[in-house]
Image (cartoon, helix red, strand yellow):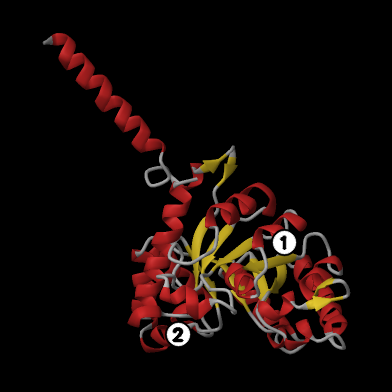
Amino acid sequence: MKLLKLITIVIVVCIACISCTSPLHQDKSTQQYKNKPIPKVGVQLWSVKEELKADFKGTLTQLADMGFEGVELAGEFGPYKDDAKGLKAFLDSLGLEASSAHAPFAAFDDEHFDKSVAFYKTLKTETLIIPWDDRGWDSAKVDSLITDLNVLFTKLKAEGFHFGYHNHEQEFDDHKDATFWDHIAKSTPKDFVLQMDVGWVTLAEKDPVEYINRYPNRTLTTHIKAKLPRDVAAKMATNGKRQIVGDDVTNWDAVIKADIMVGGTKWFVIEQEEYPDGLTPLQAVKLSKQGLDKAIINL
């Protein structure tokens, strides 16, 4: 009987130890994969832009309740448009960091530069990203974009920010025996952030892992987005695939491992632009986060 009790105790202790070392139970700061920290998980607020306009505080509260650790801002600040201190206090109350922000070049022109820098410094936002520029896939204009990116990179680096550019599918069109993305990467500094949007790369029928590995330590943040390759999306949809992380076709295990081991990634940023099967934006975001969480747990 004593032996049976001893065996039972040992089993319980072993189960507890295993539980405590799984990603679900570890403290976020101690999660690791092969001795490298697992990035934090945030959400791009563009995913719920209409919800934010209708109920800014309530929407952010729901995102915090989903377990997100941070947000990537996208120009909607609710009642805090000119109140960075108030926004910081509100995010702090929810346990959310303003880890990064998408902002246009106009936010950093001569008229707005000082105000924008002060705003994001107050929020303790570390990374600023140009989210879109149609020169990025124009052979006649891409070098003009690169010049502007490099100039702003120097200015924002001097202010203590990481700075970079976000891709869409067109940057993976052919350009000079490679792609526009390659041209931008090779024409910017080694610490210029290449914010990989996995969904757009997948839609362009390219391999995101290949590009993460090609430019080490430059994928500081990754947009975790589910899309289906453009030429077979309809067929895949009929086979049960959809634009939800974990229900799509992307090899998330490979992407996550490449980000951790090669990309230098600090944040996984869920972005949801499609809401299949009648899901609301918040429902779709929650499901994609669950899909990402599962992929991380299964590393």
Q: Are marks 1 and 2 in contact (CB under 8 Å)?
A: no
Tell me what residue is drawn at x 72 percent, y 63 percent: 160
Q: Which residue is mark 1?
A: 211
For residue 29, side relative to residue 259 (left or right): left
Secondary element type, mark 1: helix
User: Marks 1 and 2, Cα distance to the nearest angstrom?
Assistant: 36 Å
- The residue under the point 49% across, 59% down is 41
Q: Between disc 1 and disc 2, whose residue precedes?
A: 2
Where does residue 216 sit, x and y in percent of width and height?
75, 54
The label on residue 292 is none
Q: Nearer the viewer, residue 248 or 299?
A: 248
Q: Amino acid at mark 1?
A: Tyr
Residue at the spot of label 2? 78
Look at the image and tell me whether residue 272 can be seen.
no
> Which element type, helix, strand or loop, lies under badge 2?
helix
Split into 4 quadrants, where in the image is the N terminus? top left
Q: Position of residue 261 (x, y in %)?
A: 65, 47
Neighbor class of circle 1 (other Cα within 10 Å; few <14, some 14-19, many 20+) is: some
